[in-house]
Amino acid sequence: MNKPFFLIVSLFFPFVDFLYILQLEEYDFRQFFKWIRNKWWKRNFQKVGQVIWTKKLIILFAIAVILYLVSIIISFKILNFWYLKIIGLILVTIFIPLHVILAASIFLPVDIFIKRQIINKARQKLGGLSKCIIITIAGSHGKSTTRFFLFQILQNKYNVHTPDGNINTFFGLAQDILKNLNEETEVYVVEFGESRRGDFKKFFKLISRQTIAVLTAVGSQHLSLFGSQDAIDQEFLFFLNLTKAERILVNDDNEGVRRVAKMCNRGVEKYSNEDVFSFLSQESLPDSLKIEHIRQNAGAAVKIAKILNIETKTIKEQLYKLETFERRVKLTKVNDILIIDDSYNINPESARAALEYLSTFYDKRKILITGGIVEQGEYSLLKNLEYGIQISKIVDVAIVANNNFVNPVCQGIKKSEKKLQIIISKHPAETQQILQRILKANDVILIQNELPDLYWN
């Protein structure tokens, strides 16, 4: 469809816009209502990303349009005068967001039934793979990097599978099990992506048997959804206490993990970034492993590799070759400019760690691209203010997205006496234009995030 025409249609009939937001909210009705309450009149949301036309979304679109047309027909039959019909048409059109949520509600029982069938089949299939070693990784952050590191080391000895990309929901894992596991799979490495209370209970129903369980970090990720840090701690404690894994590994470098591990009624084994130094010296570390929290993830990977009898020589060779997962402190050099891409997600702990790494480039101009710290609930203002203060101590140029967090971040930056250039980006495309205009040789850029369309003003 012609883009200008699509934008005009979306202005008056924003079905796709609101379906896109519902998709970004992972079909959570409560979060969707929260969002549309303040953005009812907003249109043309797709700036950072694009709607993904899955079968489910196509069905919801069709149902929403049918509901809309039925509403118009009913209003025309009820209302007798032409001017009332026009008012009715306008009102029905204004309430398109409700047609979207009603369409999702109508489809929900079918969606639940289909998912249950798939999950049950996946559970049965996994239960039949009794010889497969299953490694489950949980944590506020560091899950994907640990999983990816472990996959790279183990694949030299085992037929190992880990889901592609960022698949870490219980339904996504069920689909992965049905599609990719077979009798030849010797090791299955997965991560559990928690975001609400009770999520681990769902994961354990799908993957009830684990060989090794890992807890990478406990922080404030998803604080707004959990409601409190205590609720987050309790969810991870649930993971440690109820996992049936033969061995449980916990990150001794992470304060949150230490706090939760003390309450655990199971025996746990500790790992840390120091485990890497059993194989490499401080002087011989590759660039990615010079970052402590990345080294912690590698520490978990080498600890598991030793448990699974990978030779010391092989582990050492692989540590030199390890590639970080996409958009997790990914280092790229373009001509004389170094790009550190840490844009997948952000929380206070990972933001601070990435800024500390940026500070090590003493002889370079340091540029930061950020959209602030998300999902901090009632602490959002405070956390972003503190984040701005951290930025001011390290960064030379801060490009801040004009989103929900722009004011506290900039207020924090301005508290510093250091001369620091702040540039507000009104649109993701504008960020690229800003970079093209200001970049110089030997600059280093840290991309922390620009956030999805849910957060842009």
Image (cartoon, rainbow, N blue to C red):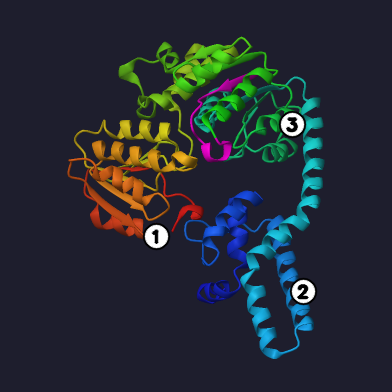
Badge 2: residue crowd in 10 Å (few <14, some 14–19, many ≥20) = few
> Is 107 rendered above or below residue 196?
below
Question: On the image, numbered disc 3 is attached to which residue?
Answer: 206
- Under tag 3, what secondary structure? helix
| Magenta stretch encompasses residue 232 | no
State which mark lies toward you, 1 or 2. 2
| 127 relative to 263 in the view: left or right | right
Q: Which residues are magenta?
A: 212-227
| Residue at the top extreme, as displayed | 267
Residue in view at x 54 percent, y 17 percent: 250
| 278 relative to 399 in the view: left or right | right
Q: Quadrant of the C terminus?
A: bottom left
Q: Nearer the viewer, residue 89 or 272?
A: 89
Question: On the image, numbered disc 1 is attached to which residue?
Answer: 427
Mark 1 or 3, nearer chain start: 3
| 110 relative to 314 in the view: left or right | right
